[in-house]
Image (spheres, rainbow, N blue to C red):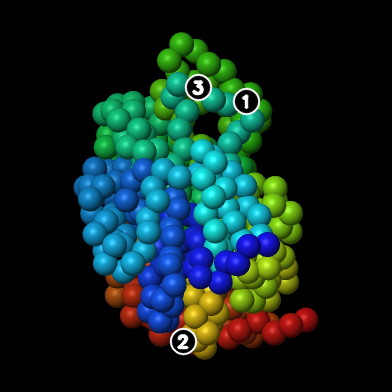
């Protein structure tokens, strides 16, 4: 193997996790080269606004940029836009055009992609994972157009909220028994569902599509128990799959993502994985799991930077998430396994509500709607899960 001791760090993936890792390395005093390779041609940008302000048209692409392009050069970070990595070997990555990028350490921040419905593709079918996706969906939605959202999770409901404000007739189909099923308490699911109904959104839970039918420029979704729904535009929002093919092909151990240890190290020496593509042990769930949130991406990026830079890592914090639907801000902290028995304590706040979720008298998670002060206080009270 060639000497890579001065090759620096190669970060593959230029989303929140990748950009934060590059900046955190410099903050940790890392002085060797840092290369950030991303397959999109855009300057790296925030993803959460895509289903909200970007889709709605109130937030322009220039306002979601993570760092101005000039800042990369100022930090001595080489940003390679529009570069895809075809192969990963010890000490070197190879691009699709055959260029070799040597590294001492490699950080995989490849993110995730929208989970597709087998056989459902063609005009009028959309997903939201990139800036281009959001802009394309916005152009397809017109006043009075019929939008069918498949998936009643955070992303689907955020997009439904935005589309309704644009004048679309929106229907949401969710396969599980509740909106945001397994992600929030029954109280929050029901209360948010009522807000969507009040906004004119028709939604159905426990709804499985058994057959799709194309009819000219429109689509028909035939369900098992909720009739047939026609749409001009279909948004598929049924979750995400990790972009782990590069790691798998390199022989890195993967299982629903790139499996990492508590320092985000993969099974390949000097290769780390962070963000949506990484699967780490979660004591709260009793298994390895991927956590798709900006907070998790940033925390793992800083952890890896500290490890590479020889600095002590920051104290671990509870996983946090947020969503904006119908003008309400939902904040969540902590993880609860779907179906786990919880004792939920609901309280009304000045502008919204707070849900404290207890497992065996341990405060495991909290949810706050339009209640930021109560949320911050609740996060400080969360109790970590203990090994079984």
Q: Residue at x 33, y 80 (%)?
A: 373
The residue closer to the viewer here, 4 or 143, is 4
Circle 2 or circle 3, nearest the eye:
3
Label 2 crowd (10 A; few <14 / some 14-19 / many >=20): few
Quadrant of the frame with the C terminus: bottom right
Q: Residue at x 51, y 50 (%)?
A: 153
**Which mark, residue 119?**
1
Q: Quadrant of residue 170?
A: top left
The residue closer to the viewer here, 224 or 273, is 273
Whether residues under marks 3 and 1 lie with C-beta atoms below 8 angstroms apart, the answer is no
Residue 238 in view (yes/no): no
Residue 301: x and y, percent? 49, 70
The residue identified by callout 3 is 122
**Which mark, residue 380?**
2
N-terminal label among 1 and 2: 1
Label 1 crowd (10 A; few <14 / some 14-19 / many >=20): few
Using residue 170 as the reference point, say whether residue 204 is left or right of it: right
Circle 1 or circle 2, nearest the eye:
1
> Does residue 56 sit above or below 345 in this rendering?
above
C-alpha distance separating marks 3 and 1: 9 Å
SS class, disc 2: helix
Q: Residue at x 44, y 60 (%)?
A: 35
Residue 270: x and y, percent? 63, 69
N-terminal label among 2 and 3: 3
Q: Residue at x 34, y 28 (%)?
A: 140
The residue closer to the viewer here, 318 or 61, is 61
Whether residues under marks 1 and 2 lie with C-beta atoms below 8 angstroms apart, the answer is no
Residue 148: x and y, percent? 46, 32
Q: Quadrant of residue 98?
A: top right
Return the residue found at the far top: 216
């Amino acid at each position: 193997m060639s000497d890579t001791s001065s090759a620096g760090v190669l970060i593959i993936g230029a989303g929140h996790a990748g950009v934060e890792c590059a900046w955190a390395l410099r903050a940790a005093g890392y002085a060797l080269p840092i290369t950030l390779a991303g397959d999109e041609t855009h300057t790296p940008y925030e993803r959460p606004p895509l289903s909200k302000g970007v889709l709605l048209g109130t937030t322009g692409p220039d306002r979601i940029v993570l760092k101005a392009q000039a800042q990369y050069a100022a930090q001595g970070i080489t940003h390679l836009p529009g570069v895809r990595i075809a192969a990963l070997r010890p000490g070197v990555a190879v691009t699709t055009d055959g260029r070799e990028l040597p590294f001492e350490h490699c950080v995989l921040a490849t993110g995730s992609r929208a989970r597709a419905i087998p056989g459902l593709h063609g005009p009028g079918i959309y997903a939201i994972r990139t800036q281009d996706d959001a802009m394309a969906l916005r152009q397809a939605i017109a006043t009075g157009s019929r939008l069918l959202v498949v998936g009643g999770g955070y992303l689907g409901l955020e997009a439904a909220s935005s589309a309704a404000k644009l004048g679309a007739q929106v229907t949401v189909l969710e396969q599980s028994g509740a909106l945001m099923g397994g992600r929030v308490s029954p109280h929050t699911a029901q209360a948010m569902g009522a807000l969507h109904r009040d906004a004119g959104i028709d939604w159905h839970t426990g709804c499985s599509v058994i057959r799709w039918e194309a009819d000219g420029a429109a689509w028909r979704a035939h369900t098992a128990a909720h009739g047939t729904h026609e749409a001009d535009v279909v948004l598929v929002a049924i979750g995400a799959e990790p972009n782990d093919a590069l790691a798998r092909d390199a022989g890195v151990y993967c299982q629903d993502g790139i499996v990492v240890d508590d320092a985000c190290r993969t099974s390949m020496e000097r290769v780390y994985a962070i963000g949506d593509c990484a699967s780490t042990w979660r004591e709260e769930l009793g298994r390895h799991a991927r956590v798709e949130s900006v907070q998790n991406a940033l925390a793992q990026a800083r952890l890896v930077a500290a490890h590479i830079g020889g600095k002590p890592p920051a104290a671990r914090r509870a996983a946090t998430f947020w969503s904006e639907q119908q003008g309400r801000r939902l904040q969540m902290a902590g993880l609860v396994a779907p179906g786990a028995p919880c004792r939920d304590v609901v309280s009304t706040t000045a502008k919204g509500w707070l849900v404290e979720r207890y497992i065996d008298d341990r405060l495991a998670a909290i949810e706050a709607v339009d209640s930021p002060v109560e949320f911050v206080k609740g996060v400080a009270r969360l109790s970590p899960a203990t090994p079984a």
